[in-house]
Image (cartoon, coloured by chain):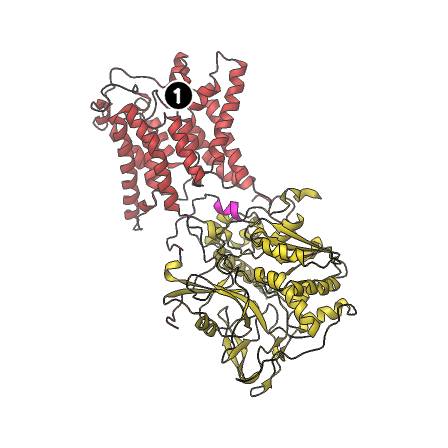
Chain colours: A yellow, B red
Amino acid sequence: MDLFGSYRNTFRNGIHPPENKDTTNGLPIRQFPFAKEYIIPVSQHLGAPAQVVVREGQEVARGQLIAKAASYVSVPIHSPVSGIVRKIAMVPTLSGSMSEGIHIEPFPYSGQEVAEGKPIPLDTSTPEEILQAIQDCGIVGLGGAAFPTHVKLKVPPDKKCEYLILNGIECEPYLTTDHRVMLEQGEDIYTGIRYLMNATGAPKIIIAIEANKQDAADHLTRIKPTDLPVEIKVVPVKYPQGSEKMLITAVLGREVPSGGLPLDVGVVTVNIATTAEIGRLLPHGRGIQERVITITGPAIKKKGNYLIPIGTPLRFVLDHVGIAEDIAEVYMGGPMMGVAVSNLDISVTKGTSGILVFGSKDIRRSETVYPCIRCGACVDACPVSLNPSKLGILAKFEAYDKMVEDFNLMDCFECGSCSYVCPSHIPLVQYFRLSKARYKRHTALKPKSQDA
Amino acid sequence: MPKLTLNISTSPHVVKGLSTDTIMKHVVLALMPAAAFGVYVFGTGALLVMLTSTVFAVATEHLLNRWIRKNTTVNDYSAAITGLLLGMCLPPAFPLWMTAIGSAISIALGKFIFGGLGCNVFNPALVGRAFLQAAFPGAITTWTDPFKADRFFNVPSSVFAWPFMSPVVDGVSGATPLSAFKFDHVNSQSYDLVMGFCGGSAGETSAVFLLLGGIYLAWRKMLNWRIPVSVLLTVLVFSGTMHFLDATRYPSPVFMVFAGGLMLGAIFMATDMVASPVTSTGVWVYGAIIGILVVLIRLWGGLPEGVMYAILLTNAISPHIDNLIRPRVYGTLKKAKAS
């Protein structure tokens, strides 16, 4: 089964965009000031939106539950501040759709102490209790996807978790949050690892770090508790190595089957900042109220890594750090997979790993789209070895069935490498997002039309 | 908050910055040394042929775009490449009116009717040349001797031949190394071949300058180096084997690689991105097929040169190569099924 052995320590293809991490990777995490108002959308993770359990006019403490998990694939939300619930109304979100949201006005003179919950003992808790606690703390993947962590950690009875891989890759350009977390929250990471080992039963732990964060790898090696079976693995820098599947291939040489999950090859991956959050919150039974965010980009004045309460309005964040006169684009997340913000009235959520601001002169994107010249740059970039050139042509002809059935469209995880390298500036990954959505809608409609 | 309107764009928000027109411009640039050398060796005639070819290619592209009421696409430089390549693979004393027709055919029938840039099945320049080969077999095999003393001041009269009148062939008409070998079994000096001090098409003779251009493009990642390497290696190995078996009948592999239009074809024509496969493995196969066809035509065919037909034929099967040779998709065990 060493069929994939030749890909050890790396994965096929990929790209090397300029890293642009130097301006912020040396800046320690700083606490962000409190805003005048917090707007907390109940839908900020994948899965069912949380259900509001407070009413307008109610006083809440920092860390208090304000919305409970609606189902298994859902997490609760805790108040980021001590204050008063002013309004519960529809609020805009990053995706452009509206979500129910809770407006909280902080008490101006509050010490903002965090409410303590029921501590979760490390040694005496069962895996189920730890998973429940992780859900109760509202923890989601902090790398950006915001998938509820407890769902990912649940090992089904017929599967076994051989390796727990902690993702400290942070392959997105500009972002330095995981880098700073590894340097500053090493103790929390190791506490988190103990909880994760208990929850998954994983006998071996690998912390995977890209070579541009050697200092973080050295630091974690230095403070590593001797009793933990942790290996710290430094891998060469390449985008999109932070993607779960690419990471597993780079670290273990195993390939997650098409359409499968990491557990199909005996692996669970967790983001490093998520691990630190688990290590910090579970011993106190607290809910997640803040997260580390890299605020950077050419149009930002005070670039840095900030610890920002969830629900802080983006407008307040940008006012505080200062922006250039002619800002043109604001992204939440990294420049490769992040989403362009259409509205500064949205707020920071659990999935916000970075806030990037570009001025109009900083955008190098060309408006001219040339025809595909079949140069093959996208083919050499695609980490899952698809043929984006062919898929792009098929997308124009709306041949969605052919794209999925003959050209493995569904294996595309939208990393954007193809669009990045395309000399004809064809928005390939956007075509693929659309095609997938159209295909799904089309196949969802099929059985219904047969029934009718 | 100074400004409230934000652009919305889809990710990725950063790009590599390489552009199709930049690639095309650099290809033109990389062809320049070999073209200039052609002018140096063959004189003003070669210059006029290459200029006419380029100008007519660009003009045809522009007019055809005007005709179908589309924005002109001459700014992407692809028509200029087609024109220049055609000029470089024509005899230095080729009549200009024929050059102009060939150039227009290249763009119109080689590229435009397929849908323009990105849709052509064949290398457009070679489509034009194939037409000229069929239409004017005499003129296209009439060669000029290199380094004629009066080459810069005395343009061969055939160049300015009146349209549809047979060109007046100049008194002394040389042969190319390939035809000399094919028909008279005369071997050329390797040094002259490598440097380009021999008869041939206007811009195909200097292996050194063509190689330099190719290396530059490959270094800038604007050319798939696997194609020329695969073509040249195949020719070297195949013709080397034949030479080893019967050295009197078959020329040396060095001669085969450096003579004729192989360098120009392998480096600048087989590498036409549109008409070549997209995968690395596919490209190796594609190059090997071209190499085999070149040797087959040169050694056993009726023509002394086979690069043009070898590339055109392999262009035609390039989509099939892409369909048959696909990399294994991540997470799947068997190769994706061919459609």
- The crowding category of the residue bearing disc 1, from other C-alpha atoms within 10 Å (few below 14, some 14 to 19, many at least 20), is many
State left or right for residue A79 relative to residue B206: right
Q: Residue at x 70, y 72 (%)?
A: A283
Vertical placement of residue A328 versus B30, above or below? below
- Which percent across, then down, holds residue A268? 68, 58
- Which percent across, then down, holds residue B313? 45, 32
Vertical placement of residue A337 versus B111, above or below? below
Q: Quadrant of residue A442?
A: bottom right
- Label 1 sits on a secondary structure element that is helix
State left or right for residue B161 relative to residue A210: left
Write down the region rendered in magenta: A364-384
Q: Which residue is mark 1?
A: B193
Q: Is residue A366 magenta?
A: yes
Q: Residue at x 28, y 20 (%)?
A: B147
Q: Quadrant of residue A357?
A: bottom left
Q: Which amino acid is tagged 1?
A: Leu
State left or right for residue A286 relative to residue A172: right
State left or right for residue A147 relative to residue A35: right
Magenta region, mostly helix, strand or loop? loop
Quadrant position of the N terminus of chain A in the picture: top right
Q: Residue at x 30, y 30 (%)?
A: B36
* Chain ID at mark 1: B
Which one is in front, B190 or B293? B190
- Which percent across, then down, holds residue B42? 28, 24
| Residue B132 shows in this picture | yes
Quadrant position of the C terminus of chain A in the picture: bottom right
Q: How many marks?
A: 1
Vertical placement of residue B234 versus A357, above or below? above
| Residue B7 shows in this picture | no
Q: Is residue A88 magenta?
A: no
Q: Quadrant of residue B115?
A: top left
Which one is in front, B77 or A308? A308
